[in-house]
Image (cartoon, rainbow, N blue to C red):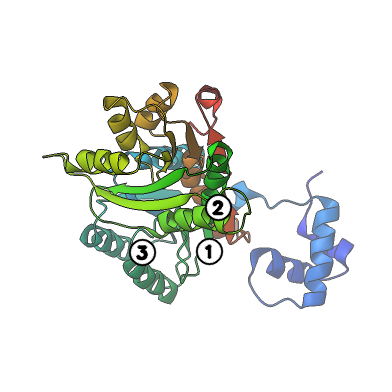
Amino acid sequence: MKIRIVDIAKKAEVSAGTVDRFIHQRGKVSNKAAEKIQKAVKELGYEPDILARNLALKKELKIICLLPDPKETKYWERPDAGINKAIKELSSFKLAIEKIYFAPRVDAFNGACKIAIDSKADGVIYVPMFFNESGIFAEKLKTLNIPYIHINIHHSEATPLSFIGQNAFGAGKLAASLCQMALREKHEVLITYISKEQQEYSHHHARIEGFINYFENKKFVQPVIHHLNLKIDTNNRSYEKQLIGFLKEHPNTSTIYVPNSRAFRIASILQKSNITNIMLIGFDTLDENIQFLKEGVIDILIGQQSKSQGYNAVMLMFNAIFRKEKIADINYLPIDVLNCQNIDYYEGL
């Protein structure tokens, strides 16, 4: 039987107008009345008629998704695919979902933000890739009363409607716990940050901090931890020489930890140099990473079901602006441990 507003009002012992104001957030409702309505809604199993709401909309709602161009950074292929899945599932609603790609540079990010502002969106989903610029963009959206959701990177000073991504600090601690299983006395660990430019993002730092924190708070073997920043230079491939030189100087290096998605770069060097006695831990299910995982060069990948980032962000924004639902401000995705034995069964792909 279809539950009507009058049924909820009768159950809660309030007026139908009060129930209507509460459900559609059209005015003030006392805390006492709200509690009674919530209880009645739960007991009756009421759900708003979403199709009727869709028909009643006078204008099409718009969600803008800003993310790095997947053609430039392959990691974003899967979040992009997740957004496409959500677009397909929500195609019957009065809802436009538009994507704006930007190159991983400050000027490109700022340009994409301007387009998003000019589009007069009802909701914005974006990756806060550049800390200061992302904070400025967040303030502009807040001033315009446009709700926004962050994916992948948690901005510590912004207050998005929700964050969807991995707990980066926790992921770092997990990586360290896996590393610890293979450690012996006098073993050394290398944390290598490899990038096309010397760009450092907050979630990569958090993964490093979590990794180091794990060893600071344990009483077992304490390895010497080294840091090496490598910049990708396709012309002379000096980063390869830099890594090999480091390993020659530190023959006790037993583990290499790569806190971003470019573990395949390190794997390629190890494979080319026939170095087989080093445990390699990296992040994310890029095709190149998966290939080296299957070949046994990368030992462990830490996944975060990246396709879900894009999909869940769109669905949560839809629930917030269309269904008027309150959504959780933090939505952590699983921290998945992947090796060559289980990668073929990973639903995150």
Q: Amino acid at mark 3?
A: Lys
- The correct choice, above or below, for 151 with respect to 274 in the image is below
Give the camera-side residue of 192 and 170.
192
Q: Is residue 32 above or below residue 225?
A: below
Q: Earlier in the sequence, mark 1 or mark 3?
A: 3
For marks 1 and 3, give the CA distance.
18 Å
- Regarding residue 329, the answer to whether it shows in the image is yes
Q: Earlier in the sequence, mark 1 or mark 2?
A: 1
User: Residue 331: where, in percent of width, then height?
Assistant: 58, 54
Quadrant in which the N terminus appears: top right
The residue under label 1 is 161
Q: Answer with left or right where residue 221 lies relative to residue 11.
A: left
Q: Counting other residues with Cα less than 10 Å from the Cα at mark 1, is it few (<14), some (14-19), or many (20 or more)?
A: many
Q: CA distance from mark 1 to mark 2?
A: 9 Å
SS at mark 2 in the image: helix
170 left or right of 20 in image = left
Percent x, y for residue 153?
A: 44, 56
User: Is there any visible trace of residue 60 in the rendered image?
Assistant: no
| x and y percentages locating residue 99 in the rendered image | 34, 48
- Mark 2 lies on residue: 316
* Rendered location of residue 254, percent (x, y): 44, 38
Front of the two marks 2 and 3: 2
Determine whether the residue tagged by mark 3 lies in a helix, strand or loop. Answer: loop
Residue at x-position 27% and y-position 53%:
104
Which circle's residue, 2 or 3, is located before the other in the chain? 3
Which residue is located at x 54 percent, y 51 percent? 222
User: What SS does tag 1 mark?
Assistant: loop
Verify CB contact (< 8 Å) between mark 2 and mark 3.
no
Circle 1/circle 2 CB separation < 8 Å: yes
Q: Which residue is mark 3?
A: 120
**Front disc: 1 or 3:** 1
